[in-house]
Image: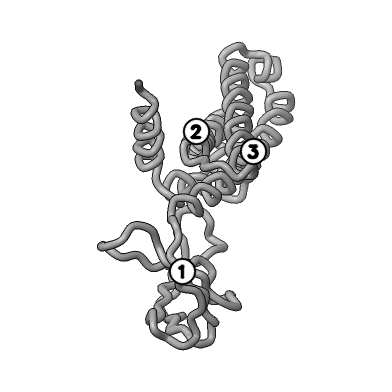
Amino acid sequence: FHVEAVFAQGLYFFTASSKNKGVTPFESDHALTRTSTAQHQAFDKGLRSLSATPALAHPQHPCLRGGQRQDLGAGLDFERAVLSGGPLGIMAACMDAVVPYVHERKQFGQPIGEFQGLQWMLADMSVQRDAARGLTYRAIDVLMRGERGTMEASAAKLYATEALGKVADAAVQIHGGMGIVQGYPVERMYRDVRHYRIGEGSSEVQRMLIAKDVLKRVP
């Protein structure tokens, strides 16, 4: 599937072989690919402004350019590091929505931000946001130095996306019933965060890659 393929000027995709390691990247003119806009599919749970469209092109099609086999992992490391930046922004937005609300919303004659239980939730949200930022910046730093950063990128992607789910859930919880009313910012953020734990390799895949790196370091 190509996300937003109906708006693309061209397509960049990979082919893989069961006989050889790595992938072969190709670039294609969108007008010459057999993209079926009739099978346009909208996302239902979150990201409703985006769409996924099946797109097919034959490897021998004259519109294709490229064909040099490359290592799939190196490209995915960059994609995972970049994808980790999305959760940082959404977690910051959750905090921006929550902090003013806990000052304004009052229960039992005082702002709810003065209740210790809620303060602990805020503390966890803040720590999770900052920890995710640190892991993401580390991964980007390693990759920008030209080093192979599979473990760093996977750690950033795993932690940032799972922390995002917790932070968004806490934001909804703090808002109470208003947090699940359609049209409120935290309600949309809560819907939009779920796909981050799936795209560019699920959380389970990231754990597998991290564990593989850890086991290689054992003397």
Residue closest to the eye, 30 or 111: 30
Instruction: Tell me the quarter of the picture where residue 209 sits.
Output: top left
Report the residue that reaches farthest toward the front. Answer: 219
The percent coordinates of residue 136 (x first, y second) are: 59, 37
Q: Compared with residue 52, is residue 166 higher up or lower down, i.e. above or below?
A: above
The circle drawn on residue 159 is 2
- Please provide percent x and percent y for residue 132: 58, 32
Mark 3 and mark 1 residues within 8 Å of each other at the beta carbon: no
Residue carrying label 3: 141
Q: Are marks 1 and 2 in contact (CB under 8 Å)?
A: no
Quarter holding the N terminus is bottom left
Q: Residue 103's quadrant in the figure? A: top right
Q: Name the residue: 58% across, 16% down.
A: 120
Of the residues shown, which amino acid type is indicated by label 2?
Tyr
Residue depicted at x 54% and y 30%:
170
Disc 1 target residue? 68
Q: Report the disc number at residue 191.
A: none
The quadrant of the rendering that contains the C terminus is: top left
